[in-house]
Amino acid sequence: MEKVKVGVLGSGDVGKVLAGGFLKLGHEVRIGSRRPEKLQEWAAGAGNGASTGTFAEAAKFGDIIVLATHGEGTQSAVELAGAANFDGKVVIDATNPLDFSSGGPQLSIGFNDSLGERVQRWLPNARIVKAFNTVGNAHMIDPQFPGGPPTMFIAGNDADAKKIVTQVSEAWGWDVADLGGIEASRYLEPMCMAWVVYGIRTGSWNHAFKLLRK
Ligand SMILES: NC(=O)c1ccc[n+]([C@@H]2O[C@H](COP(=O)([O-])OP(=O)(O)OC[C@H]3O[C@@H](n4cnc5c(N)ncnc54)[C@H](OP(=O)(O)O)[C@@H]3O)[C@@H](O)[C@H]2O)c1
């Protein structure tokens, strides 16, 4: 893939890990936050090609945009970033609509809608691809499991956008399974809960999904 600019919306672990993955592939990355100053330490350690900015500055910068914001803050982050800054762009949506108000996480949207679909509705001119929401950030880049490469499930309406996300995912060591249009996010977001519940039950976070085919 030719070198591109990537705008990452999200200053948490997922934003930083996916930013690091793109930098490793030689792309330029700008991470956005409501308070970009908190990313100074990250930027200092991330090397050439890394920069920080507001959500709007990161979105404007990116040829590809990564959405790695808290589920409940995602709509606000998208509004702060400015819808026009997403027009025509591939958007990797790694978010999950998790509600922590009653203690442990629960899904706050489903089963006939999803955050991925909402993001696509908020940004009708963007090419949203749900991806990287079904595994913990520690295993997003170069996942190492005895059973071989795990499967990254993706969903989105734009075939070319999914080709790009597939290329990136494969470069990071994933097998990719395309579940079709963005409405399949309503199945991918619950998969996040299956991943989390298994982690809580076992006290271990070193697992990933793999689709076995024959
Ligand atoms: N943690 C994981 O391993 C993992 C794995 C897969 C998917 N996910 C999903 O990926 C997303 C990011 O997770 P994370 O753990 O890296 O971080 P997070 O704490 O869920 O989200 C941090 C980001 O959300 C933004 N944010 C929070 N509330 C906001 C609001 N009201 N308005 C605008 N922005 C707001 C923060 O903005 P500021 O920078 O301004 O503070 C920050 O950039 C989540 O949707 C999560 O469910 C997480």
Image (spheres, helix red, strand yellow):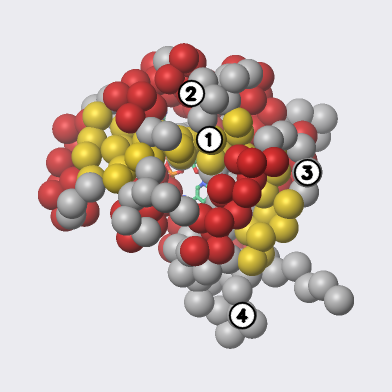
Name the residue at 66% across, 60% down. 176
Q: Nearer the viewer, residue 48 or 79?
A: 48
Instruction: Give the alpha-carbon distance from disc 4 to disc 2, as whole Å.
Output: 35 Å
Residue 190 vertical position relative to residue 121 in the rendered view, above or below: below
Q: First in sequence: mark 2 or mark 3?
A: 2
* Mark positioned earlier in the residue sequence (3 or 1): 1
Q: Quadrant of residue 182?
A: top right
> Mark 4–mark 3 contact, CB under 8 Å?
no
Q: Quadrant of the C terminus?
A: bottom right
Q: Confirm if mark 1 falls within 8 A of ligand 1.
A: no
Which residue type does callout 4 highlight? Gly
What kind of element bears circle 1?
strand
Where disc 4 sits, the SS reads: loop
Disc 3: which residue: 180
Point out the residue furthest to the bottom here: 146
Mark 2 — residue? Answer: 86
Label 4 within 8 A of ligand 1 by Cβ: no
Say whether marks 2 and 1 touch (CB < 8 Å): yes
